[in-house]
Amino acid sequence: MSSLNSVGDRIKDVMNKELMNYRSFGKKIGYSDVVVGNIIKNRNKPSFDFIFNLIQTYNWIDHTWLLTGRGKMLKTGKEIIDNNKCVETDDKTSVSDLRHTIKIQQELIDFLKEENKRLKTENLKA
């Protein structure tokens, strides 16, 4: 993984996680490979629209991490519930998207199990 010092480094990390090159990644978020390359190489800063498209396309990315480097790349299950996010699938869904869906769903299941355990413990104490 990259050093994650800049927004470009974190975008590169997302691109690598998706196993994409500049062209495929750019196409998915609506930008050219040149624009993506310039951002990743820290020649240019991403525009608001670029970041917005990236977060809309990959709704599992924590926007605070993307912008600041603080926290983790993946949203937690609770954040996904709180934001009412879900990953929709269609005939064009890639294997990578499905893997992320499975990972997010597993994180959500783990979070709900822990929350259930916590609530049961609280209920027993009351």
Image (cartoon, rainbow, N blue to C red):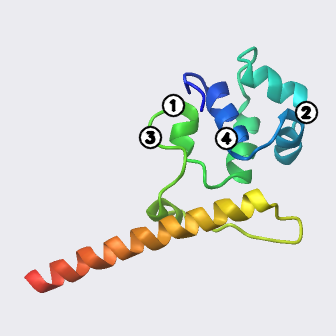
The label on residue 68 is 1
Point out the tag, 4 or 3, that comes first from the N-terminus.
Answer: 4
The label on residue 8 is none
Dot 4 corresponds to which residue? 14
Pointer 4 with pointer 3, Cβ within 8 A: no
Pointer 3 with pointer 2, Cβ within 8 A: no
- Vertical arrangement, residue 68 with respect to residue 18, above or below: above
Q: CA distance from mark 4 to mark 1?
A: 14 Å
Residue 43 in percent (x, y) is at 75, 14
Q: CA distance from mark 3 to mark 1?
A: 9 Å
- Vertical arrangement, residue 110 with respect to residue 28, above or below: below
Query: The disc labelled 2 sits on which kind of residue?
Result: Ser
Q: CA distance from mark 1 to mark 2?
A: 24 Å
Point out the tag, 4 or 1, that comes first from the N-terminus.
Answer: 4
Residue 2 in percent (x, y) is at 60, 28
Pointer 1 with pointer 2, Cβ within 8 A: no
Residue 79 appears left or right of 124? right
> Residue 36 occupies which quadrant of the picture?
top right
The label on residue 71 is 3
Residue 112 in percent (x, y) is at 40, 74
Query: The disc labelled 1 sits on which kind of residue?
Result: Thr
**Considering the numbered disc 2 on the image, is that residue within a helix, a strand or a loop?**
loop
Pointer 3 with pointer 1, Cβ within 8 A: yes
Q: CA distance from mark 3 to mark 2?
A: 29 Å
